[in-house]
Image (cartoon, rainbow, N blue to C red):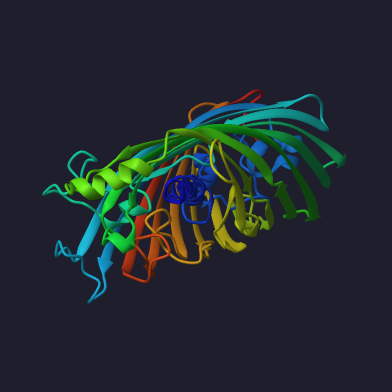
């Protein structure tokens, strides 16, 4: 039973950890509008008028035009792991590449002005929804001639999909000077994790897989968001947005497949203790997030925005794990609160064309890089264009390049440093927005 519990615990550890690269500083998808993404999402105090204020700046809905917006983010990411001298595996591979992956992240917004001071809106978006996949041998041929990354013991094919529904209301407390907004968030998520489990070190199987673990589940939860904007002087705004912590109850199934070692005695001993497929559950506390920012318009055509974001990832410190047939456990990950700085600018080059650019820096949330989260401090550069197709219809496009400095990490759970993770990515975003009543002037 102790071996059975160890394998089951490892499966749930995978469930908890895989959520992190999809939500943390490492790969959070805040490119939820091509207009905002063109300036690296800087602009809690300089919102776009395409309806995306429902997410980025709830209070700004009260002064934004009624609009409907649909968009798509195309996220491309890749990683390379380079072994340190002395840590090269028996296969002789000195580095391992994760094939580039492309994920599509849709979003939609509706903002409607009830009167000069009040607006209501709703957003449907996926701020969390990526995945990581490393090449490994199949479970029925664990010692194949193809790529077989050691990180398979941590996780080799992990997917997470999340959907947020955000109804929101906003009001101008002091017309054109002080605005507030608030709403609730209904969160739906699903997850699938695949990993290998290594065998008992006492049997000489410390780096040999004995099980292939698949875990799939889903859950829902609620949280809230609030925002405020204050005009400091005619050309300068101060704003803030707060997203509350979401407590998501995850329920799912853990399926176990024995991976044979080709030693009948060992395989028989392992099979006698092999865990049965069972249900498993945990509670994941998605962290609270605070964004404060300032904007200034030196001229009517130029807008500048600076944001600071604090994400409270320390809520990921520990997770209770409940098994259907085994003893409960607690997993500790040790994540830290993390900071992000964003600077963005936009310039109206002509009456039809808007040009945008931005730079973003964020620090790592994880204590070290792993196959689940090959994450570290990151830099983002962005460019974007917005084109006015008519008085009410506009098309926006943007691109971001993401570069992460090399970071040391492990390849197996609780293992020592084994090498360096390299990572980069690109995001392209496209949005079509229609404003009822026409465009708002800067």
Q: Residue at x 40, y 63 (%)?
A: 404
Q: Residue 75, position in %: x, y? A: 39, 43
Camera-side residue of 33 and 175? 33
Seen as rendered, the residue at the extreme right is 174
The answer to whether residue 47 shows anywhere in this view is yes
259 vs 343, nearest the viewer: 259
**For the point 44% across and 50% down, which residue is it?**
10
Left or right, 395 with reference to 177: left
Q: Nearer the viewer, residue 276 or 410?
A: 276
Tag count: 0
> Is 223 left, or right, of 359 in this rendering?
right
Q: Is residue 83 shown above or below 56?
A: below
Quarter of the C terminus within the rendering: top right
Q: Going by the picture, which residue comes out furthest to the left?
A: 145
Q: Position of residue 340 (x, y in %)?
A: 58, 61
Give coordinates of residue 392: x percent, y percent: 58, 26
| In the image, residue 116 above or below residue 47 | above
Q: Taking the image as drawn, is residue 349 in sight?
A: no
Q: Residue at (45%, 58%) from the top-left corner?
A: 380
Most foreground residue, 362 or 173 = 362
Q: Residue at x 16, y 47 (%)?
A: 262
Q: Is residue 389 above or below residue 59?
A: above
Task: Residue at the far bottom: name it.
Answer: 85
């Amino acid at each position: 039973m102790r071996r059975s519990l160890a394998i089951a615990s490892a499966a749930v550890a995978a469930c908890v950890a895989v959520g992190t690269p999809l939500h943390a500083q490492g790969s959070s998808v805040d490119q939820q509008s091509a207009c905002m993404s063109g300036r690296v999402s800087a602009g809690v105090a300089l919102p776009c008028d395409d309806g995306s204020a429902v997410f980025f700046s709830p209070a700004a809905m009260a002064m934004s035009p009624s609009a409907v917006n649909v968009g798509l983010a195309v996220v491309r990411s890749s990683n390379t792991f380079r072994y340190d001298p002395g840590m090269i595996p028996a296969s002789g591979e000195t580095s391992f590449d994760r094939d580039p992956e492309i994920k599509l992240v849709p979003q939609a917004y509706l903002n409607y002005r009830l009167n000069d001071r009040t607006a209501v809106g709703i957003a449907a978006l996926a701020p969390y929804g990526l995945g990581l996949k490393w090449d490994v041998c199949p479970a029925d041929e664990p010692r194949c001639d193809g790529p077989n990354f050691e990180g398979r013991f941590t996780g080799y094919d992990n997917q997470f999909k999340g959907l947020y529904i955000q109804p929101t209301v906003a009001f101008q407390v002091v017309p054109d000077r002080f605005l507030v907004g608030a709403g609730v968030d209904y969160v739906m998520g699903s997850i699938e994790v695949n990993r290998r489990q290594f065998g008992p070190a006492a049997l000489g199987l410390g780096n040999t897989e004995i099980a292939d673990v698949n875990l799939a589940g889903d859950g829902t939860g609620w949280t809230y968001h609030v925002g405020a904007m204050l005009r400091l002087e005619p050309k300068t705004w101060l704003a803030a947005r707060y997203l509350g912590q979401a407590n998501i109850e995850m329920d799912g199934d853990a399926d176990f497949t024995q991976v044979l070692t080709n030693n009948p005695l060992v395989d028989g001993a392992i099979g006698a203790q092999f865990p049965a497929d069972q249900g498993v559950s945990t509670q994941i506390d998605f962290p609270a997030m605070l964004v404060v920012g300032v904007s200034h318009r030196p001229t009517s055509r130029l807008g500048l925005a600076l944001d600071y974001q604090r994400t409270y990832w320390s809520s990921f410190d520990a997770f209770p794990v409940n098994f259907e047939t085994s003893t409960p456990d607690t997993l500790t990950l040790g994540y830290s609160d993390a900071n992000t700085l964003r600077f963005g600018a936009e310039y109206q080059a002509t009456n039809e064309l808007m040009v945008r650019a931005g730079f973003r820096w964020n620090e790592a949330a994880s204590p070290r890089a792993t196959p689940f989260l090959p994450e570290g401090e990151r830099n983002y550069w962005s460019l974007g264009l917005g084109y006015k197709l008519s008085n009410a219809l506009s098309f926006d496009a943007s691109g971001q390049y993401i570069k992460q400095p090399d970071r040391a990490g492990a390849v197996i759970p609780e293992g020592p440093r084994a090498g360096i993770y390299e990572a980069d990515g690109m995001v392209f975003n496209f949005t079509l927005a229609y404003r009822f009543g026409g465009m708002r002037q800067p």
